[in-house]
Amino acid sequence: MCLGSVKIHLTNSVLGRWSSFAVFLVGVIYIVALVIGFTTYGLSAPIVDPLLAIMEILTVIAALLMLVMMAAIYGRAPDNRKTVGAIAFAFMILMTGMTSVVHFVELTAMRQLGTVSLVWPSPAYALELLAWDVFLGLSLMFAAFTFDESGCERLVRRGLLLCGILCVFGVVGPVVGNMRLQLVGVFAYGGVLPVVCLLVSRLFRDEGRPAIVRAA
């Protein structure tokens, strides 16, 4: 392997490792903020600023980090799985763009207007659920098939697939008007996904070690 290709592999491994680990950290922080919100305002009352603004900022950060992670997953995919990797990356682009627009509008214009639109039913909330339930779910499911079904990749593959399926199932809630069903999606990207991202980070870390040895 030539030195140039080793450098490319190292760059992809580093991006994949640290972006996925950062998603895990942001997920943990978000869960802590959510627990604080429920403890402060209860389960029935809505969470308000400044905690709500912090959670929205964390959401955008997580989406941007997942975009980098998915690019790295596409980058490591073998040639015969590049197509599914590209599809996963495309859905993640849609997810990141849509949720970033929604929260940017919420953090700026909607707050200056003194209104809140991220409540159900509302167009903004519907777009948010389209991003996190449908686009994210499809991205994770396609990404799962870039990994092998053996060795240390098997757990990542199954974790991504499970998380993706649960995300897509969450869209049943807004479709039928029963938002309790959407909690399945919340559990997927709020609870399962951070753990899966930690596994992805460790996989990238382990894959980067042989390249460092060859480079030396």
Image (spheres, helix red, strand yellow):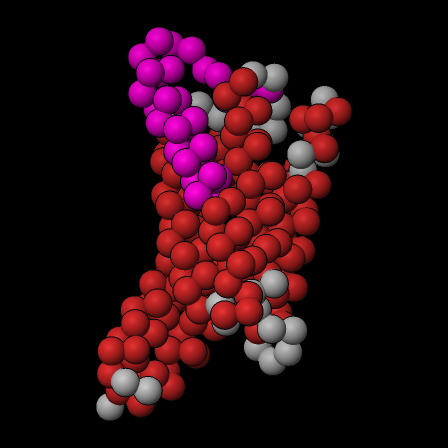
> In the rendered view, would you say 116 is above or below 192?
above
Is residue 36 in sight in this rendering?
no
Relative side of 4 to 34, left or right = left
> In the rendered view, would you say 180 is above or below 166?
above
| The one of 50 and 89 positioned closer to us in this rendering | 89
Image spot of residue 25 (x, y percent): 41, 55
Callout count: 0
**Residue beneath the point at 60% across and 46% down:** 137
Image spot of residue 64 (x, y percent): 37, 45
Residue 105 found in image quarter:
top left
> In the rendered view, would you say 112 is above or below 4?
above
Is-magenta flag for residue 205? no
> In the rendered view, would you say 5 is above or below 67?
below
**Residue beneath the point at 48% across and 39% down:** 95
**Magenta region:** 92-120
Image spot of residue 140 (x, y percent): 57, 53
Is-magenta flag for residue 119? yes
**Residue beneath the point at 38% across and 54% down:** 68
Image spot of residue 93 (x, y percent): 44, 43
| The one of 127 and 28 positioned closer to us in this rendering | 127
Q: Quadrant of the C terminus?
A: bottom left
**Residue beneath the point at 59% across and 61% down:** 144
